[in-house]
Image: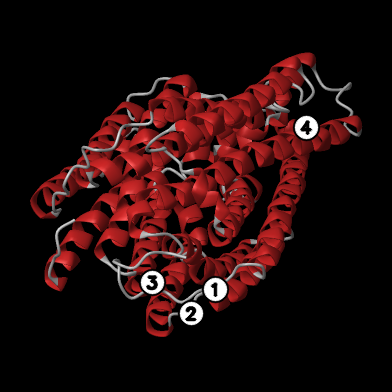
């Protein structure tokens, strides 16, 4: 990339952050509204797939684009990412059932993976590792701001407008991002001497797909010990072996094996994987507590998560500036992850909105301190020519961790909820109730009812007055079953984040480089 003035670098970063904000706000705006959307479209059993497919496609796109952008420059991929994401968002708004929504979210995921990989690598192109701390903090603040605005706006929209507008309202920002990138982002000379690693890309993609499908379907679609799940894991191991063979022979590997000889890269990526597995796996089910257990509407559900986002925005911006000023980063990870552990511990036992808000603040503090660190450590540990693939490897492990975490937590959630409901049903005697009314009461044994409060209240009003106490008891039992299941989910996520914290002690800290012309360790 050509040498740019500081002023030009700032304008380029404005374009990059606009593209990131467009992708992030479209992701966060649906978070509080997703339970209501699932209740409208049906298919709670497939709830985790709406998230999983997005993570799956974005993971594959992220790692493939890393090397390609090293060869062809970041600009064409940023543009392609925004266009693909816009197409996916538009189609999501046209969904008529859960399976269409899953398909279109997959398209969105491809665009998001391209945008995120190219955006974080662009920071490495423009600034030295010592300067990157400040900009990484600001990019995390963009995520934080979208997390403040998105859930609240998404909740309000789904309460007052047709849900389809959730996916369409920010499309104009995508157009603005496209124009800014075209006008401001510099071109990079194409490396014509390097060949695309088609074979390595194919085997890596197949390995990721088989692995993530195995975790996503295990315990839900099929038993963990079933032929299908074991077959997927065997296929994943086979494709991994073929990928390693292909990379050893490739002249320009899509993911160089030499990266994994670097202890800083390996430990940073392992921490990112485990941390995201625990964090994403737990947080994705937070709206179930706020809306399902506490009965808060999607509009006000966004206000509950807002303290986490505000805390994260402020702390991540301060952390980034401190890292740039001191050149030290490990201390912030050692400080941040215990706050994340504490936040998830509070979530596991929260019994009111007030306690949930406290959990959000504590967890947001940990996110702001810890999250900007591990991409920076990876970028600082490699030479500038490997910046794209190194950043992609970091995003790959984070995305895979998040996807596997969501899948495992989904299994834990469904299994625990089913067990709790079975236990509750044993103590319920409906033999004296009229069969026709008993059939209506069956609807109140479906956890999806808790996620659509207006429908729940409307259904309650259709039942005879003498049955109302029974209905109230069934709803309370349903809430308790869901709450107990969520406690198990949050504790599982907590355990994983604790493991990530222990690994931070083994992370070797090296000085942040002050130039992009120096080679890594």
Q: Mark 1 or mark 2: which is in front?
A: 1
Using the image, determine if residue 211 lies above or below residue 477: above
| Helix, strand or loop for disc 4 | helix
The answer to whether residue 111 is left or right of residue 491 is left
Quarter of the image that includes the N terminus: bottom left
Q: Mark 3 or mark 1: which is in front?
A: 1
Rounded to the nearest angstrom, the CA distance separating label 2 from label 3 is: 10 Å
* Along the viewing direction, whichever of 458 and 30 lies nearer the viewer: 30
Query: Which residue in the structure is indicated by mark 1?
Result: 509
Using the image, determine if residue 14 lies above or below residue 478: below
* Along the viewing direction, whichever of 484 and 202 lies nearer the viewer: 202
Q: Is there a contact, CB below 8 Å, between mark 2 and mark 3?
A: no
Using the image, determine if residue 314 lies above or below residue 11: below
Residue 107 screen position, x and y as percent? 36, 29
Count residues near mark 3 (Cα–Cα under 10 Å), then give few for <14, some for 14-19, many for 20+.
many
| Helix, strand or loop for disc 2 | loop
Q: Which residue is pictured at 52% across the width and 25% down the height?
A: 206
The answer to whether residue 350 is left or right of residue 40 is right
Q: Mark 2 or mark 4: which is in front?
A: 2
Count residues near mark 1 (Cα–Cα under 10 Å), then give few for <14, some for 14-19, many for 20+.
few
Mark with earlier residue (3, 1): 3
The numbered disc on residue 418 is 4
Q: Quadrant of residue 158?
A: top left
Rounded to the nearest angstrom, the CA distance separating label 4 from label 1 is: 46 Å
Mark with earlier residue (4, 3): 3
The answer to whether residue 385 is left or right of residue 399 is left
Residue 166 screen position, x and y as percent? 34, 40
Q: Mark 4 or mark 3: which is in front?
A: 3
Residue furthest toward the bottom?
326
- Residue 344 can be seen, yes or no: yes
Residue furthest toward the left?
183
Query: Which residue in the structure is indicated by mark 2?
Result: 328
């Amino acid at each position: 990339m050509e040498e740019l003035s500081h002023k030009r670098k700032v304008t380029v970063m404005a374009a990059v952050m606009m593209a990131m904000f467009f992708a992030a706000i479209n992701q966060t705006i649906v978070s509080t509204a997703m339970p209501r959307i699932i209740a409208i479209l049906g298919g709670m059993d497939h709830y985790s797939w709406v998230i999983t497919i997005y993570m799956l496609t974005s993971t594959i796109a992220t790692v493939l684009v890393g090397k390609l952008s090293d060869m062809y420059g970041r600009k064409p991929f940023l543009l392609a990412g925004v266009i693909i994401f816009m197409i996916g968002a538009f189609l999501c708004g046209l969904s008529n059932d859960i399976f269409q929504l899953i398909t279109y979210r997959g398209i969105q995921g491809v665009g998001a993976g391209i945008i995120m990989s190219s955006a974080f690598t662009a920071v490495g192109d423009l600034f030295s590792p010592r300067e990157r701390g400040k900009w990484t903090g600001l990019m995390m603040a963009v995520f934080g701001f979208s997390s403040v605005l998105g859930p609240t706006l998404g909740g309000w929209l789904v309460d007052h407008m047709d849900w389809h507008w959730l996916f369409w309202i920010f499309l104009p920002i995508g157009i603005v991002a496209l124009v800014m990138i075209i006008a401001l982002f510099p071109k990079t000379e194409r490396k014509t001497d390097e060949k695309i690693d088609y074979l390595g890309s194919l085997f890596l993609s197949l390995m990721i797909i088989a692995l993530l499908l195995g975790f996503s379907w295990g315990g839900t679609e099929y038993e963990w010990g079933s032929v299908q799940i074991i077959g997927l894991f065997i296929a994943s191991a086979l494709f991994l072996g073929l990928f390693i063979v292909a990379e050893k022979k490739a002249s320009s590997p899509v993911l160089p094996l030499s990266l994994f000889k670097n202890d800083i890269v390996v430990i940073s990526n392992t921490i990112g994987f485990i941390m995201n597995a625990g964090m994403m796996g737990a947080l994705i089910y937070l709206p179930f507590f706020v809306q399902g257990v506490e009965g808060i509407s999607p509009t006000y559900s966004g206000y509950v998560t807002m303290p986490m986002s505000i805390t994260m925005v402020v702390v991540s911006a301060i952390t980034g500036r401190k890292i740039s000023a001191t050149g030290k980063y490990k201390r912030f990870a050692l400080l941040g992850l215990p706050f994340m552990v504490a936040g998830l511990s509070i979530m596991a036992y929260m019994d009111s909105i007030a306690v949930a808000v406290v959990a959000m603040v504590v967890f947001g503090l940990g996110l702001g301190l810890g999250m900007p660190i591990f991409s920076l450590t990876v970028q600082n540990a490699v030479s500038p020519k490997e910046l794209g693939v190194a950043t992609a490897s970091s995003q790959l492990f984070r995305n895979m961790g998040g996807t596997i975490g969501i899948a495992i937590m989904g299994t834990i959630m469904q299994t625990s909820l089913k067990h709790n409901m079975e236990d509750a049903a044993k103590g319920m005697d409906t033999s004296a109730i009229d069969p026709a009314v008993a059939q209506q009461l069956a609807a109140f044994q479906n956890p999806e009812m808790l996620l659509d409060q207006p429908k729940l209240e409307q259904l309650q009003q259709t039942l005879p007055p003498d049955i109302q106490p029974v209905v109230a008891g069934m709803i309370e039992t349903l809430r308790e079953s869901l709450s107990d299941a969520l406690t198990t989910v949050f504790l599982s996520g907590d355990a994983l984040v604790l493991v990530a914290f222990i690994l931070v002690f083994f992370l070797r800290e090296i000085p942040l480089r002050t130039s992009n012309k120096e080679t890594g360790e």
